[in-house]
Structures are given as C-alpha cells and as structure tokens.
Amino acid sequence: MKILRPGIVATALAIVVAVFLMMPLLAVVPVSFTPKRFLSIPTDEWSLRHYWALIENPAWINGIWLSVRIGLISAVLATSMGLFFSLGIWMLRPRFAGLWMSIALLPMVAPPVVSALALYFFLISLSQFNDLVAYDTLAGVALTHAVMIAPFAVVLIAVSLAQVDRRIDLAARSMGAGLTTRIFRVILPNIRFGLITSFFLTFVLSWEEIAVTIFITSVDAVTLPRLMWMGLRDNIDPAIAAISVILIVIVAITAVAKSAFSALASRREGKSGLL
C-alpha cells in the first residue's frame, strides 16, 4: 500500500497555520510572569507572584475544586443519559428514531442564552421546594451542565453503537442471555472506548462552561470559569493569565500523552499483525 506524504509546501503551510493559531496562547505566557498588578508584558523583571497568588488565594483553590466536582458529576450524568437513550434507540429501533434523536440534540443547537434563561427559571422553581438541587448550588449547576452536554454524549455513544454488529447481540439472545447480560457482557464491552471518550469530553465541556453558569450562579457556586470571568470583568487580574498557562500546559501534556499512547498501540497492533 502506497503511503501518501505531504510535500514541502503543504508542510510549511501547515506549520505557518499552526504557529498563527498558537500565537494568542503563547502571548499569555509572558503576561503571567509580570510583576505588576495589571496585565502587561514584563520588560526587566519576571515574577512568579501571580502563580503564588493562585496557591495563597483560597478563592482560586475553591473554584478549581468546585469545577472538578461539578465536572465529574455532570460527566457521569451526561454519559449515563446518553448511554440510556442511545442504547434504547439502538435496541428498540423505534419508528420515529430520527425525531427522538433530534429532540435529544436540541440543547446542542439552541442558543446558549435561551438555554440559560430556561434553566435559570427551572432552578428558581426548584428552589421553592428544596435547597439541594436549586439556584446557586453545586447540584443545581451539575444538573444544568449535564443537560447542556448530554447531546455530545448521545452523539459519541450512538456512533459507537452504530459500529457494533447486531448479530453478536442476536447470537447472545438466541443462546438465552437476558437483557442485563446482553447489555453488560456483550454490548458495553464493545463500546467502552466510546463511553470513555464521552466521559472525558463531557467533563471538559462542563469544566469550561460559562454562558449558562453566569445565569444560574451568584456567590455560593463560583466555578473556575466564572471566577476568571469575574476577574476579567472587574479588575483584569494577571492571575488569570497564570491559571491560563497552567491549563494550557495540562492540555498540551494530555495531548502529547494521548498521541504517544496511540502511536504505541498502533505499533503493537502492527507487530501483532506481522506475527
């Protein structure tokens, strides 16, 4: 099989485009080392004061910890809802499957402001009956995030299920396997990578969610994106640049690790094929 490789011009253009897209991210790095109290490029002196501020200021630590908890809860809820819905569509094959799928994907295509207002009034109405799942609470924010990111889980899991051969489910059914056995022993092992991808994607989407969070939080449930938005809106704190650099480094390390893992897995599969 002939492998097509990009030419010199295509490679050069790709590098130029990549550098152009990364320039705004790279510009944040020197700003995070400014010794001043406002956003500026350091000239003579470089300082770590804003990185220390992230550790010494409990608001940043609390915001990060709250975002992690909300992200985990939202990812579990969204992945579970996406799995239940997609699995039901795949197994039952209802007559109006396309219509049900369109309804499930509505939060993805609806304007964020419209969704935020609807979820705001929903949580306000819940606040009249309980204090747990309500406005400006951890559970309330996690629930609304799950509603917003569930369509992405539906898409990923539905694509994974579409690649599963139905004959293995029919074979298990013909041999007397019950519904629970078919789901947990036959179907789920074949879509495990789709489930893992769905969980991580929904976690990231919940982690960076800000449009809806602004409407449904006030002073108690202050997530990291909302804290950064407040800093940019009120006093443009350079600590925002510091936390941005940390997030960029984490994403870069994760991407490199994923690429290395994929390359290692492909190499092992190639060796197995040769054997």
Image (spheres, helix red, strand yellow):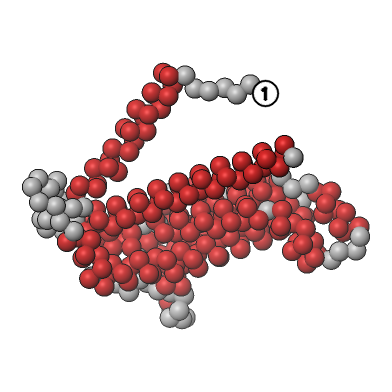
Q: Nearer the viewer, residue 134 or 252?
A: 252
Q: How many neighbours does mark 1 have within 10 angstroms: few (below 14), some (14-19), or many (20 or more)? A: few
**Residue 22, image x and y in percent?**
32, 38
Q: Is residue 67 visible?
A: yes
Q: Nearer the viewer, residue 147 or 21?
A: 21
| Residue at point 40%, 74% (across, down) | 137
| Residue at point 61%, 45% (across, down) | 265
- SS at mark 1 in the image: loop
What is the quadrant of residue 87 in the picture?
bottom right
Is residue 188 toward the left or the right of residue 123 in the image?
Answer: right
Is residue 229 toward the left or the right of residue 146 in the image?
Answer: left
Q: Nearer the viewer, residue 269 or 131?
A: 269
- The residue pinned by badge 1 equals 1
Q: Is residue 129 above or below residue 109?
A: below
| Residue at point 20%, 47% (across, down) | 30
Is residue 193 toward the left or the right of residue 130 in the image?
Answer: right
Q: Residue furthest left?
A: 44
Label 1 is placed on what type of residue? Met
Q: Residue furthest bottom?
A: 130
Quadrant in which the N terminus appears? top right
Q: Is residue 103 visible?
A: no
Image label count: 1
Quadrant in which the C terminus appears? top right
**Residue 189, image x and y in percent?**
71, 57
What is the quadrant of residue 268 in the picture?
top right
Is residue 112 toward the left or the right of residue 152 in the image?
Answer: left
**Residue 18, image x and y in percent?**
37, 33
| Residue at point 34%, 36% (across, down) | 21
**Residue 190, image x and y in percent?**
71, 53
Q: Residue furthest front?
A: 275
